[in-house]
Image (spheres, helix red, strand yellow):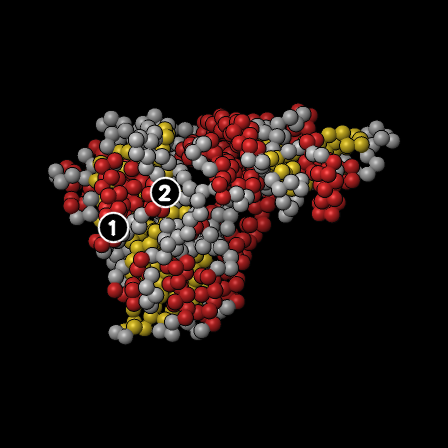
Amino acid sequence: MASATSLALPYLNRELSWLEFNARVLEEALDERVPLLERLKFLAIFSTNLDEFYMVRLAGLRRKVTLGAAQYAPDPLSPVEQLEAIRERVNELLVRRRHALRRDLLPALAQHGIEIVSMDALDDAERARLAAFFESQVFPVLTPLAVDPGHPFPYISNLSLSLAVEIRDPETGKEHFARVKVPRLLTRWVSTGHALRFVALEDVIGANLGSLFPGMEVLRWYTFRITRYSDLDLGQMDQPEDLLETIEQQVFQRKFGEVVRLEVQRDMPESIRQLLMEELSETEAQYVAPVGPRDVHDRDELLELGDLMQLASLDIPELRDPPHTPVVPPAFRDGRNIFDVIRERDVLVHHPYESFSASVEAFLEAAANDPQVLAIKVTLYRTSGDTAIERALTEAAEAGKQVAVLIELQARFDEANNITFARTMENYGIHVAYGLPGLKTHAKTVLVVRRDFDGIRRYVHLGTGNYNSKTARLYTDVGLFTCNPLIGADLSDLFNSLTGVSRQKQYRRLVIAPGNLRARTLELIDREAEHARAGRGGRIIAKMNALVDPEIIAALYRASQAGVDVDLIVRGICCLVPGLPGVSDRIRVISIIGRFLEHSRIAHFANGGAPEYYIGSADWMPRNFDRRVEAMTPIEDPALHRGIQLVLETCLADNRQAWELGSDGTYRRRTPGAQPERATQALLSKNPWGTTAAARALRKRARESS
């Protein structure tokens, strides 16, 4: 049996695997089968994904190098080797991004009248319009910052777009350097007056720099942008007395994290690049080596390509995906009391194919308005502002119900939103807790306690996705409504441990991290291997966002060697190597990148003919097993199994959006055959939990394809 920490364990580097995921996102921008504005959206997503990678993963890796951190077994690469490989791969991807933008997307957009043009390309009327726009909307907001003995090099905020300006005093001939920040609160793409013709805001500012430096000669200007380390450092701190205050301080300190990347306009002269690197090195309190030439990205004239999302949102239906309106789940269509429905049978919902507002939000609204409801308890990881969920919780509290909300303050880059949400909840008298020290609460759970005709009953929702109305329209997730008394009792115990003091580790039905989720997952995999050895066959299908944990990977290798057929649907990072003779030759891995972000976590174990299905909040990563509060629940009603199986089999049958991971660590896009299958389209067209002839035919075709 291979040790989970052995260097001999076949294992793909996590960071490079993530870059390959982002490369698959970029490929959607190049795919001519994707509607044009959706392609632009994917290029924007690729860019914002890369920003976050540098702010967190690469920045953390640089710190490991500085601290001399040891190689993480079983990763084959040391931190230094990882940095080198990352730089090489990122450079390749940036070249590909430039080609995607310049050779494919911009020319294709121009054919539809959508243009990003330079100031030189404008006619007199357009110039006059933009001059007026600059004077009235832009000039009052700008603050030119000179650099000289009386003006130190200014603080540069993370990911802000700036102009590096060289000016000359005509009286003295002395040259000066100045920085002008491009305001993020203004639109990046300024209309020229023609409906779909735009100029980048930085070009408008650059053409009017004389207004900022009157009497001076503007020699030249170029855009630049920096990236700072932006993760929280709670792990390095003593136990905080006030977690809310500590998180607020950390969010503020994030603004001053060390610079880890400098992006510059492609044709920026070496002298200005060198000046920026020197000034950043002198003014920044660096925990690691300052940025050098190898940390400079100069692959395009346009920086901050995440802002292309604004153009991707243009209302041009023929260039977008067809509109999708989620359907009301069948169980909730007849207008009956939602608690009556759940009391009769478990209900499984699938977003965004089925409506979030008509299920999860309706459940909480009903709980808020039902006089028989006594208490509502919710875990919230990523909030979305003024939503039906917030209104339901505050209305319930105002009605005198006991309301408890566990808000995860450490949800990366949503900390500020969650802090605001927490304070709003407290102002309404809601009991707000922030979870357990040293652990993020990532579980997706709602508990409603209701006085029924036959006594107190618990109604539960357990899901794979956040209680966020915005992402519920974009992410695929599943959720279970149940009033199973054992699951309800488990969730009561979980909430008690989150809001109080508890050493609860054993649960009746739920599988909880960091308690027994790791052990139970290993047990389920090993049980499948025992079935295979005993001649009863073995089958595992698991869908998740990431597979990183070495111990789980080692167990999957053992299962493959025992004869278990394993299909993994892993959207993002996958460190497991499939298809290795004698090691993982029965394991197949695909990644689906398409219209919706594949976010659901589902696991199926054949169990010798008594199949089991689970859904939950956890990916198979060390942090989810060991450093987060996660909840996985079995789906016990056999009537719901066919729907989950259909989702899994439809994904496995996808030959349009799916990429296969090879034993060489390379992903290859599947080639559609005579009958192309796109999982998203199939699930949009059919009810996954239905029993229609069409649904049965789809399930049969999916099984045959897989």
Give the percent coordinates (x, y) of residue 362. 39, 62
Disc tally is 2
Q: Return the residue nearer the eye: 684 or 348.
A: 684
Mark on residue 680?
2
Residue 662, placed above or below residue 193: above
Residue of label 1: 692
Quarter of the image where one finds residue 156: top right
> Which label lies toward us, 2 or 1?
1
Q: Amino acid at mark 2?
A: Thr
Q: Return the residue nearer the eye: 108 or 593.
A: 108
Give the percent coordinates (x, y) of residue 130. 71, 41
Farthest residue to the left: give it.
Answer: 535
Instruction: From the viewer's perspective, tell me whether residue 7 is left or right of residue 279.
Output: left
Q: Quadrant of the C terminus?
A: top left
Under tag 1, what secondary structure? loop
Give the percent coordinates (x, y) of residue 426. 50, 65
Q: Residues within 10 Å of mark 1 (few under 14, many from 20)?
A: few
Under tag 2, what secondary structure? helix
